[in-house]
Image (cartoon, rainbow, N blue to C red):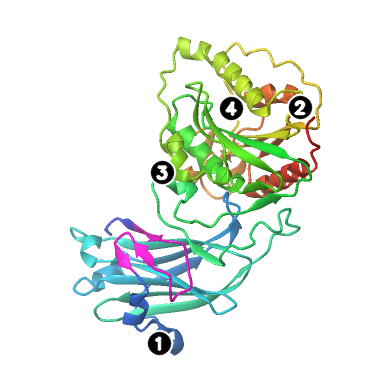
Amino acid sequence: MSLPRIRALIFVWCVCALPAHAQRGFGNFGSFDNARFLRYPFDKWAAENAKPQIRWNVRIDPPRLSPHQRMVAGLHISVDGDEIRRHQNTGPIIMFVRIEDSAGHRYQTGGQRPIALLHRGAQFLDLDYDVSAFLLPGDYFVSLAVCDGRTLEHSFVRRRLHVSAINADPLPDAWNGLPPVEFLPLNGIPDAWYIPQLRSRIRLPIETQRPVRVELLVNTTPSELGSLISFRRNMELVVPSLKVLMGIAPSNGSAGLSIIDLNRRAMSDAQADLLAADWPQFRSSFAELSPVTVDAKTLAGQRGMLDYFAREATRLLGPTDQPDGVAHALIVLSAPVYFTRQDKPPPPPEVPADPRRRVFYISYSPIAAVVLPGTLPAGRSGAATVDSAPEAGSTIRRPLYIFTDDLEHVLKPMGARVFRVSKPEEFRKALAAILDEIGKMPAGR
């Protein structure tokens, strides 16, 4: 009887990619820098086109648009446990990743793993090494290698990778000035959502003829109060989108950031200058879910949460008669919020349409994998999250939330334009529409 297969996952930790002569990468199982590419004959392997000496598998995922509004591709190297066993008296196993752009600039990183850490009793774990990278549209060569650090047995592969531009891109200039390649670091929550090590940022200038104040209001409270799973599922989309929105820069005006915790009825953080705001200043707002005991009192208090939200949204939008001659725009970013067990508050009074006061609501829903009728495995029913990996062909992917949520009920009477999105492509289109409308706003009185 064969031993069960066990996998050991190795991820890359590296700073943003720079040209190879300057860039340094870090593996979470030992440091890794460009000296390794000189110490080992990587360039010789690239030139010799030799047969693989280590049994391995490689995979390059097709590039896709990520919630960070960047094209991302995944690179994967795997060596099975039986092959690891063959190297038990040598090692360590070293992995190399190099990406070369069309101008010949090289971006590289890698990792290593001692054989001893892959040894579990009589078994040897499979080795999986995964790297992701942000890439600008263009053509690249991807070189991957694995070697035994003592014997120099190795395998090498070089493949072409094409990253297509977005068809009819609604934000064609958003990537101006970004590096062609940036490797993504491995982070814990909440840094994994924001990726603070990558200092490059999408810039979203707004050409405004008149002064405008843009306020960004981000909600962190999930529908399922106290649910860490719901909170993290929502923030996987909300936090990267927040980082994108932090690139908003009116040519004649300013922007600010407020982060609201409806459960505590408090502002977790407020930054008057959006461009100067940085992750360490508001990281704690996403570090943990505010504690809550869901009881009759809490459920009754949900009406107060929406009342509080309405008051704060109105405050940030400013009075109807603006004395400063500045137009005001409020952008609300949240996953859909449904407080179903409550006496809902009456909607705010209708606000007369005012082109100098605009409200935009981006309702960003996670995606669910829904099991189709008649294909359920025994003992299972209902919908599963994407991560549950149901059998191929038995599911469809759709937004987890599809109905009007409670925040929309509050914002609609304020004249809000609502964008319900569930994909990065939809968010990009919504963002382009919002920037266009803000740019056309007339001044206040």
Q: Residue at x 63, y 40 (%)?
A: 255
Residue 250 image offset from top left, x and y in percent: 69, 46
Task: Establish if 366 lies above or below 347.
Answer: below
**Helix, strand or loop at mark 2:** loop
Q: Which residue is mark 3?
A: 189
Mark 1 or 3: in front is 3
How much space separates mark 3 and mark 2, taking CA atoms? 36 Å
Mark 2 or 1: in front is 2
Q: Give 339 or 199, whichever is nearer the viewer.
A: 199
How much space separates mark 1 and mark 4, taking CA atoms? 57 Å
Q: Which residue is mark 4?
A: 337
Q: Which residue is mark 2?
A: 415
Contact between labelled residues 2 and 3, with CB atoms less than 8 Å apart: no
Residue 104 image offset from top left, x and y in percent: 55, 80
Give the mark nearest the N terminus, 3 or 2: 3
Q: Give 316 or 185, whichever is nearer the viewer.
A: 316
Image: magenta residue range: 9-32
Q: Give the quadrant of residue 215.
A: top right
Would residue 445 be visible to someone looking at this image? Answer: yes
Crowdedness of circle 2 by 10 Å Cα count: few (<14), some, many (20+)?
A: some
